[in-house]
């Protein structure tokens, strides 16, 4: 039996690469790729994307080769985003680009590292991983001779900064946002007061689908949570029970994989059904019409949102706060804090090119240089750098 799938026609409200609002620095169009395909390739080839392979998702990157990292998570989000975009008639390449780029700004050790950097930078405009992603894409990648950053299209940058929805109440009313957003000289150009385009909305929810379901997978394989604990959860429990009944003699490994596979399918189907309902009701005629709506066009049903909330509460209590995860998290926090304090007080310990940009111990420029340096580290590099600085058994 062969799979049969017919690609739907392009939606009238899909983003059109031929009508992109363009790039900050004009460039001749590619002869082989659309504007969004070109963006995707630039993200894939940038150094920040490569570093995701050794950055924490839930478990520290060196803990086990089978646990997910930021890189494998981003690839999984991209696959889900492309599938959803294809069915809805949206631009798959833009959805994929946004999925691949959404985690570029994460520091080592995930949210534990972010919390420490934000606290350490409280007198220097703070730190936020989503805002750091924008800085990476527009300033911190130094590969092109004509400009800093990757010079991505308006649609990609807009989708990245609005990964969690609108950031401002109205044009110019952006009080309380992380500094790295509002410091971007094209900030108002990105229209932060509106919703993102449809492909960005798809990528954001594909992120939810991927990390919630794959965290179940990683948690079970790490023996932090057990299948029997999941059976009381709505949606998740019935799926695991169903797989057990259908395959009573299958291995635990196959049972987990099959249940998680089905769960992802259920989430995707719910998202498609609810989004089609909203599309039929709103009848948007362009991507800009989607941005101008008062509510998201893409979303889960209310019933699915309740099931998601129950799962997240379970994972928070039983996995993310598990004592083994807590022990790793506290070590990670201490490591990042000590790295920041050492470099902040002794910037001459930085490599010469970085040291040349600082303004002395405790200075504002020093703080941002140190923060950027640490935020760009992988888990493994942060551990090695910490060892080099604090252990007499380690040399340059």
Image (tube, rainbow, N blue to C red):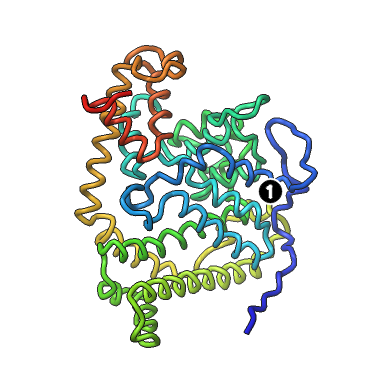
- Badge 1 crowding class, 10 Å Cα cut-off, few under 14, some 14 to 19, many 20 or more, is some
Residue 119 horizontal/vertical position (percent): 31, 33
Residue at x 47% of width, y 69% of height: 264
Percent from the top left, x then y, of residue 75?
52, 54
Determine whether the residue tagged by mark 1 lies in a helix, strand or loop.
Answer: helix
Instruction: Give the image location of residue 17, x and y in percent.
Output: 73, 49
In the image, taking residue 320 as reference, residue 165 lies left or right, namely right
Circle 1 is placed at which residue position? Answer: 37
Name the foreground residue: 202 vs 61. 61
Check the picture and name the quadrant holding the N terminus: bottom right
Residue at horizontal 62 percent and vertical 35 percent from the top: 150
Residue 232 appears left or right of 274: left
Residue at coordinates 42% horizontally, 58% vertically from top-left?
A: 211
Q: Is residue 283 above or below residue 349?
A: below
Q: Is residue 159 above or below residue 363?
A: below
| Residue closest to the eye, 223 or 128 | 223
């Amino acid at each position: 039996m062969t799979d049969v799938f017919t690609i739907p026609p392009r939606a009238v409200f899909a983003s059109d690469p031929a009508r992109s609002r363009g790039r900050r620095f004009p460039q001749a169009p590619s002869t082989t790729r659309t504007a969004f395909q070109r963006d995707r390739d630039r993200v894939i080839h940038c150094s920040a994307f490569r570093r995701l392979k050794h950055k924490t998702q839930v478990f520290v990157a060196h803990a086990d080769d089978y646990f997910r990292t930021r890189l494998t998570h981003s690839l999984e989000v991209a696959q889900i985003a492309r599938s959803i975009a294809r069915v809805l008639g949206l631009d798959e390449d833009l959805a994929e680009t946004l999925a691949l780029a959404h985690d570029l700004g994460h520091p080592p050790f995930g949210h534990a590292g972010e919390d420490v950097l934000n606290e350490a930078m409280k007198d220097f405009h703070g730190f936020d991983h989503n805002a750091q992603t924008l800085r990476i894409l527009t300033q911190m990648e130094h590969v092109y001779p004509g400009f800093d950053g990757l010079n991505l299209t308006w649609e990609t940058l807009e989708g990245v900064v609005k990964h969690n929805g609108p950031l401002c109440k109205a044009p110019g009313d952006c009080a309380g946002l992380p500094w790295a957003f509002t410091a971007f000289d094209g900030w108002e150009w990105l229209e932060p007061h509106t919703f993102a385009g449809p492909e960005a909305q798809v990528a954001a929810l594909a992120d939810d689908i991927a990390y919630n379901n794959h965290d179940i997978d990683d948690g079970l394989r790490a023996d932090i949570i057990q299948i029997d604990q999941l059976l009381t959860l709505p949606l998740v429990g019935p799926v695991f029970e169903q797989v057990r009944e259908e395959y009573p003699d299958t291995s635990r490994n196959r049972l987990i994989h099959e249940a998680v596979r089905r769960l992802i399918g259920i989430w995707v189907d719910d998202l498609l059904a609810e989004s089609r309902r909203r599309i039929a009701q709103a009848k948007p005629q362009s991507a800009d019409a989607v941005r101008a709506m008062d509510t998201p066009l893409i979303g889960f049903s209310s019933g699915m949102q309740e099931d998601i909330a129950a799962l997240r509460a379970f994972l928070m209590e039983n996995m993310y706060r598990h004592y083994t995860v807590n022990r790793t998290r506290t070590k990670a926090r201490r490591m990042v804090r000590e790295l920041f304090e050492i470099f902040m007080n002794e910037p001459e310990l930085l490599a010469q090119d970085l040291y040349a940009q600082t303004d002395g111990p405790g200075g504002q420029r020093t703080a941002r240089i140190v923060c950027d340096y640490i935020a760009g580290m992988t888990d493994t590099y942060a551990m090695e750098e910490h060892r080099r600085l604090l252990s007499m058994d380690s040399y340059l």
